[in-house]
Amino acid sequence: MPRRKIPTKAELIQLQKLYKTDEKIAERLGNVTPQLVAYWRRKKNIPKHSFPKFSKQEIKDLWERYGDDHRCGLELGISRAAFYNWRRKYSLKDKPAFLKLEQLELDLGGPSKKTGKRLNYGHQTIVQKIFAERAGLDKVEEGETIEVEPDLAMSHDNAGEVIDKFQELGLNYIWNPNRVVIALDHSSPAESRAVAEAHRNIRDFVKRQNIKYFYDISEGVCHQIVVEKGHILPGQLAMGTDARTTSYGCIDAFAVGITPEEMAAVWARGKVWLKVPPTVKIIINGKMPKGVYARDIILFVIRKLSSSIASYKAVEFYGTTISQMSISERFTMTSLAAELGAKTAMCSFDSITRRYLSGRSKMPYRPAIADKNADYDATYEFNIDHVTPQISMPGGVDNVEDIAGIAGIPVNQVVIGSCTNGRFDDLRVAADILKDKTVHPDVRLLVYPGSRSIYLEALKKGLIRVFIEAGAMVLNPGCGACMSGGKGALAEGERCLATTSRNHRGQMGSPDSEIYLASPAAAAITAVKGVITDPTGHVK
């Protein structure tokens, strides 16, 4: 075995800041004893870490607030065991009755007036509530710049770029491995030697940094994984190196896309400066007509509003239509809200959110609910009782038309999947249309389940069999053709109808190809007919 390289003094000091004790540092480095770490310290004149002293009131306040040693430890920057020891020292042994009451109120999905809950100032939006919580402030104002620590830092295949930028900073250890999620979903499996080497470098970095939440090529789309596995919760703040990070707003979280350079700084410091954005309120009322889905609703809103109406702003969705949507449908709404120029988009916490999260995470959370009289930059209201199926024309998601108005255009390929429409209910809608039918001989139908668990559920419920019998190709979970990651590329002059997130020129291969975007129902019936078809008369 090659001899281990001894960490430099600067590296040991950084490790000590992150992990505190010799035991934890040894565990982090692997195959090293605490005694060896202590020896290295003494040789480099680094004193043993001195734990900060916490008062009984500090420990008591956190314990009554969270009732969980791990979460309390995160707030103080110490381990779960260390916080437990502080509790024992101050004889705080029992689960606080206050927290039990807080959790009972949380189940009801409403705001609380109890001490320790988010305070109601009468004019705060969801974003302001979340920013104030993360910054440890009572309240924040629109336009104010504050420093916050994210609850989640997500990257996908571009984690390689983040790693390069991080290493340029001269650091060897990231701020908090337990808050970092990396998922390989864009080019999975690798379609070239360059991509394979990039994936290898990411895997090596993950092992060195002891990043627990790493999802390799078989797991699915990064955004689906984050929400599905409870890595982000209501009232929390997330950052991701992808524009569709806004998807996490479907469960009442603030989520924003940032660059690899910005993510490298987050990995290094664990802190970032953000300006509190103004918020646009969009109210959607009415019952979705037959053949109309969440995809059609958000495209209708984008069509009515300009693509820059929410530039550098947050969007909050309300109304009877939103309140009846599943988390999957809200996911589609918040994901495509980025096409309004929004930095983030959110649906308010309610009983549907609570039921979805049940069993997905053991961590306590506190939803952020806007005040009744919150101040909004603008408010827009829509009624969708008479909306018809919509479609994005080639060149931009915001170029929206009625499907009925352009029906009859022949296509060469249909893609069902991606983060916007690759969940089980999307696959079920498509399978219901495809059952006992055959894909048109001039069309290639590609199906990408959003995640491995979705794939398994579709397999169990017989949906995969329906796709295969119809003549479709069911591929591995992931982004697939959305990024032309080696599968589903279009040739010059070809047309594709997809449920993916973007249709810019060259998005799926040749810059001379055309991409139309619509709902899974429209995609399924188009695959059967061979031409773009309004799904209204073909859904059950």
Image: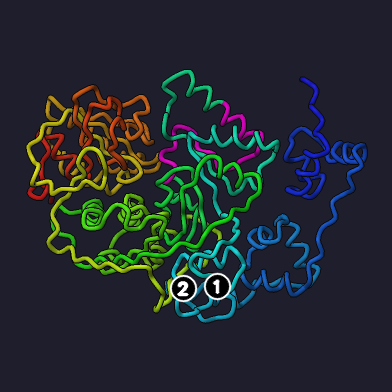
Horizontally, residue 395 falls left or right of residue 255, namely: left
| Residue 257: x %, y % from top left | 46, 48
Say which amino acid is labelled 2: Gln
Callout 1: SS: loop
Image color mode:
rainbow
| Residue 34: x %, y % from top left | 84, 41
Horizontally, residue 151 falls left or right of residue 398, namely: right
Judging by the rendered image, the residue that carries numbered circle 2 is 124
The disc at residue 139 is 1
Callout 2: SS: loop
Query: In which image quadrant can residue 435 be found?
Result: top left
Q: Of residues 218 and 197, which is closer to you in this image? A: 197
| Residue 54: x %, y % from top left | 78, 67
Asked if labels 1 and 2 touch by Cβ distance under 8 angstroms, the answer is yes
Q: State the CA–CA distance, disc 2 to disc 1.
A: 8 Å
Identify the residue at horizontal 58%, vertical 27% (top origin): 201
Identify the residue at horizontal 80%, vertical 22% (top origin): 3
